[in-house]
Image: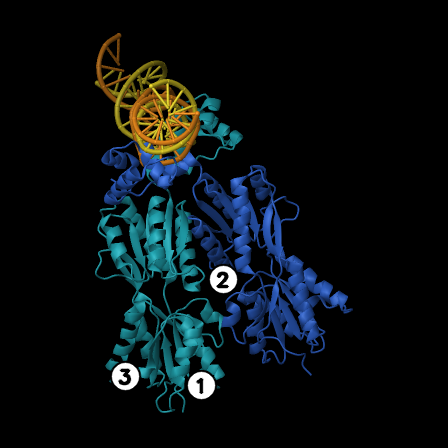
Chain colours: A cyan, B blue, C orange, D yellow
Amino acid sequence: MKPTIYDVAREAGVSIATVSKVLNNNGRISDKTREKVSRVMEELNYQPSLVASALTSRRTGTIGLMIPDIANPFFAETARGIEDCAQQQGGDLIVCSTDRDDEKAARYTSLLLRKRVDGLIIASHTGQTEMIRRLLADRVPLVLFSADIRSLESSSVTVDDYKGGYQATEYLLSLGHRRLGVISDNLPGSKLRVEGFLDALKDAGLPFDNPANLTHTSATLENGRKAAAAMLGQAEDLRPTAVFACNDLLAIGVLKEARSAGLSIPRDLSVVGFDNTMLAEICHPTLTSIAQPLREMTEQAMILLNESIDNPAAPRRKIMLMPELVIRHSTGPVPG
Amino acid sequence: MKPTIYDVAREAGVSIATVSKVLNNNGRISDKTREKVSRVMEELNYQPSLVASALTSRRTGTIGLMIPDIANPFFAETARGIEDCAQQQGGDLIVCSTDRDDEKAARYTSLLLRKRVDGLIIASHTGQTEMIRRLLADRVPLVLFSADIRSLESSSVTVDDYKGGYQATEYLLSLGHRRLGVISDNLPGSKLRVEGFLDALKDAGLPFDNPANLTHTSATLENGRKAAAAMLGQAEDLRPTAVFACNDLLAIGVLKEARSAGLSIPRDLSVVGFDNTMLAEICHPTLTSIAQPLREMTEQAMILLNESIDNPAAPRRKIMLMPELVIRHSTGPVPG
DNA sequence: AAAATTAGGTTAAGCGCTTACCCTTTCCCT
DNA sequence: AGGGAAAGGGTAAGCGCTTAACCTAATTTT
């Protein structure tokens, strides 16, 4: 059997309280005793049970991360950021891929609560508003990530999606484009991104009068292709010369479709993505994209989460960071 | 406070043992009592503490996954596979990105052991042979994933790396290529992949006489570019017409470098990757790659791990699955 | 030199479950 | 009708820690 605190205590000739104190480095212990106990711990290769300690201290040191899919690079990068923060404070991370399935999300949430995780980070929640409301009512430490729910008094860390959409569009307009297309996915932030897109056009005095140039779909390469195929299949004077996609995967789908339609990028078509995942560097041409300051976001999320953990009754805060346009090779001046 | 099993018992007018029994659906309980208790649990919104239950039952229901980096698509996809298996059996997953840093790996391992995870899956360990040996000696349930340590009697699930390298090379030879390059990364399996590469050449009666065409580096896009730059910078009659890279990221680096050197792919240069991650579909041209049957591998890993968890003294098993060549658009007949 | 601190521990009561074992009833057989 | 088995549930002892409260001896204070 694994040695327990009792074994250490007996071997060192002290009480378990003393052992506990050297373990947690609190209480008053003489150097002599401390060393003695430490030595015994070494000798026995003692690994204190964090589950026992969690039972008494009410801290598990693990946090739960709910995301749509860890295999999606944006969320993988998010997870990495959170993991690093957690690790820095001696904790760890349980990853839960919900596939944007409410039932699965509910099952995972329940599991995490029963495991008594210290807190939850919920990235790109989708339709679990009611569940999240209940969690908040129960004072569960939690922060929404990358997508807020305005109606809820929840902590959250987001990028200014509206601004991102606006920025992307402004940039395309500055390149001379006048007929723009936009492809939205069904993640919460995208609605705002599209609003930013539309407002940028409006502010430039341009009408958005071709509904075929606005597509709503879910974030896969294939859907990006399909959406692009539909837009690019229009008559020459209708089809967009630039497309803003609400995430990189969709944008890359557009790249692919455009190429197989014989278009050259960025000569014939400009494309802007969103998220600035590693994929933007992988594809060809490399993708101009709106970056979320992911590292900063995960750090802030962890800070907010810690606040709630330390004081579940503390007021929740919302943090919104600025997106940044990263220009690569998928955008250029309007043709002709 | 959260309700405990005592609250439920009191409210239902039974003993905590009875509550525990309906919770775990064992023991003999009349339908009437069971329903009564269940109703009370509902009313109180009772969430049984898995940490308390873990303390007595010695099962946490969580497993630890050690990988170099969750932000790397191959490992993200691996994690997703394992997560699904865990979830299916009602458990979950703690993800640990080690950055291939031995000390970090050691810290994480210790943390996982103290958290009393049920078992470990170690993907692409790097240089922690001694640590793993100790874990095995301690009967820690564990399976090595994607890279085995032959000298250790450990369970493992791998792809036949040698075969994969051989297959990739055979294919390139069949396209008429005679001057081949190979770029290896420093993950454990790659050594075997290179061996397969060299043996395929040997078996075809071709010498591998230009050491400049074998590069050893770590797996990043940039390193792929650099390696390619060096190889392609050679005199026309020396430089390879086809390159086998030991992972997709390196391969894509080659693609990029070749393009900026003015080469057209696959007309002037063929490239084969390894792992068949989603990146192979993202890049352009799409990448021919050796696929690891990831889904099957994660399932097998979970089966082996469960075996060890159920019986830590059970003999460990090694499973090796076959890789598969997935042909896309980065490979073609030898030029000229 | 007596009183008050302080240093260095110990005691013991939980934390919220599981489970072996025991105790009543009730049922069934012969 | 009497005895054994089965059904239904309770008792209590842990699991391996943390921590408030307490105790004793040594040190300081005045």
Q: Residue placed at 26% from the left, 43% from the top?
A: B39
Alpha carbon distance from label 2 to label 1: 31 Å
Circle 2: element type? helix
Mark 2 — on which chain does it sit? B
Where does label 3 land, which residue? A208
Q: Chain of mark 3?
A: A
Q: Is residue A18 visible?
A: no
At label 2, the amino acid type is Pro
Mark 3 and 2 residues: CB-CB less than 8 Å, in contact? no
Snapshot quadrant of residue B248: bottom right
Q: How many marks?
A: 3
Q: CA distance from mark 3 to mark 2?
A: 38 Å
Q: Chain of mark 1?
A: A
At label 1, counting other C-alpha atoms closer than 10 Å, the crowd grade (few under 14, some 14-19, many 20 or more) is: some
Circle 1 sits on which residue?
A267
Q: Position of residue A219 (x, y in %)?
A: 39, 70
Whichever of labels 1 and 3 marks the residue nearer the N terminus, that label is: 3
Figure check: B118 above or below A109 = above
